[in-house]
Image (cartoon, helix red, strand yellow):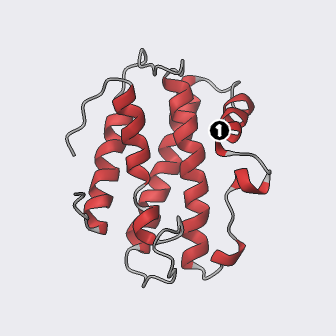
Amino acid sequence: MTNKISLEQKMLNTKKITELILDLPVSFSLPNGWGLKELLLHLWSWDDEFTKICEGKMNDSLDQCEFEFKKMNMDYVEWNDYVLEKMSNLTLDEARQKYKETRYKIITLYEKLIKFPETVEDEKSFYRTDRILDLWQHDKQHLKAGGIKIDF
């Protein structure tokens, strides 16, 4: 049985995992061959997507929001590869800065979003606030795959 956690706890978990990610050693790698730079760019790309969703939700324009991979008629795996290829010229420091800026932006948006009443009725929709704030779980999966123990 999965315990349902509060939006506030999800916020706290996002902040905790962000610090873990920013403290990863340069040598960090994942079984799929990604190094730290690729992980940061991957996480940045999804943070950027969810930033657009948060802004759309708070501006009551969610009907205009669509994930980029869907707009491009790709599956998300193809889109992940596309983003990494598109950003391959960035240095590790540039990737870290991109991730950091967007992550702090989304944390600020989350803090505002949790004060808004829920407008999406479909409980399975990725556009629901509780699902949007589960983005930290995505980070957790990658860190666990890279051998990082996470106890929250």
Q: Nearer the viewer, residue 114 or 104?
A: 114
Q: Quadrant of the N terminus?
A: bottom left
Left or right for 88, reference 33: right
Q: Nearer the viewer, residue 89 or 70?
A: 70
Q: Nearer the viewer, residue 125 or 33?
A: 125
User: Where 12 sits versus 98, above or below?
Assistant: below
Among the 4 quarters of the image, the one containing residue 80 = top right
Q: Residue at x 43, y 45 (%)?
A: 138
Where is residue 90? Give x, y as percent: 65, 27
Left or right for 38, reference 9: right
Spot the residue most to the right.
72
Spot the residue most to the front.
1
Where is residue 48? Give x, y as percent: 59, 52
Where is residue 102? Give x, y as percent: 53, 50
Q: Nearer the viewer, residue 117 or 96?
A: 117
Residue named by callout 1: 77
Where is residue 133? Give x, y as percent: 41, 61
Identified by mark 1, the residue type is Val
Mark 1, other Cα within 10 Å: few <14 / some 14–19 / many ≥20: few
SS at mark 1 in the image? helix
Q: Residue at x 24, y 30 (%)?
A: 149
Spot the residue most to the top.
27
Q: Residue at x 41, y 19 (%)?
A: 28
Say how many tags the image has.
1
User: Where 44 sits versus 120, above or below?
Assistant: above
